[in-house]
Image: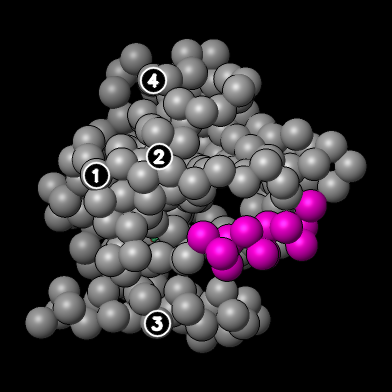
Amino acid sequence: MLEQLGRKFARFTTNQVVRWPRAWPLFRWLTRVQFNRIAPAWDERRTPESFASLEAALDALEASPSRVLDLGTGTGRAAFLIAHRYPEAEVVGVDLAEDMLAEARRLTPPELAGRVRFEQADAERLSFPDGSFDLVSLANMIPFFEELGRVTAPGGSVVFSFSAGPETPIYVPPEVLRARLGELGFTEFADFGAGNGTALSARKGQAA
Ligand SMILES: C[S@@+](CC[C@H](N)C(=O)[O-])C[C@H]1O[C@@H](n2cnc3c(N)ncnc32)[C@H](O)[C@@H]1O
């Protein structure tokens, strides 16, 4: 019952915030409470399948990123996957929910401890300078387009992935992602599917 409500709240929040980003402060507190509450059990729901569409999108990236941001990192699984894939990369995982981050830190493999770090922050307003990252990843995460566009370096990539495609509680249709990213100067859109998951990648123009 609580689980069902949580999924509905996540979908509702995503739809509202994508349409009206300024509405986010109305949802922030409850979103944080919700994810803090489920943090201890979240990782049990993650399987390699959960990130198959993210992997498919990464397979198609031309360049290996060296500075990576994983927004809404949760227990850090996407951050670990990316760090393993790109052994030269520094990876930052950001999340609103402290308890998710505590899990992410606890689960960090020792061999990644020097290159993966986690920070508590709101993806709506990040403290990183413009163009700090050459890959920004969002796995099952509400997008704050202006801010993720700001921190992506010219020529850098963004990858959105949804573990259960349109059935994912936090889901944004590809046509919406394309339209919003296009306004921010992103191009080279590509769609991916793997298992039940979907993903979309895009590249920020050099002049954007
Ligand atoms: C559905 S979970 C996905 C976690 C992880 N990416 C995964 O796929 O396992 C969404 C995560 O985004 C975080 N989140 C939601 N809104 C956020 C925001 N504005 N800034 C940072 N993190 C946020 C939540 O706390 C939660 O950990």
Locate the N terminus by quadrant. bottom left
Gap in angstroms between the C-alphas marked 4 and 3: 34 Å
Q: Amino acid at mark 1?
A: Gly
Residue 49 versus residue 161 in the image, above or below: above
**What amino acid type should be assigned to the residue bearing mark 4?**
His
Q: Give the number of the mark in front: 2 or 1.
A: 1
SS at circle 3 = helix
User: Is residue 93 visible to us here?
Assistant: no
Give the number of callouts. Answer: 4
Residue ID for mark 1: 195
Q: Is mark 4 within 8 Å of ligand 1?
A: no
Instruction: Give the residues drawn in magenta, as a range.
Output: 174-185
Q: What kind of element bears circle 4?
A: helix
Q: Earlier in the sequence, mark 1 or mark 4?
A: 4
Residue corresponding to mark 3: 12
Q: Any magenta on residue 141? A: no
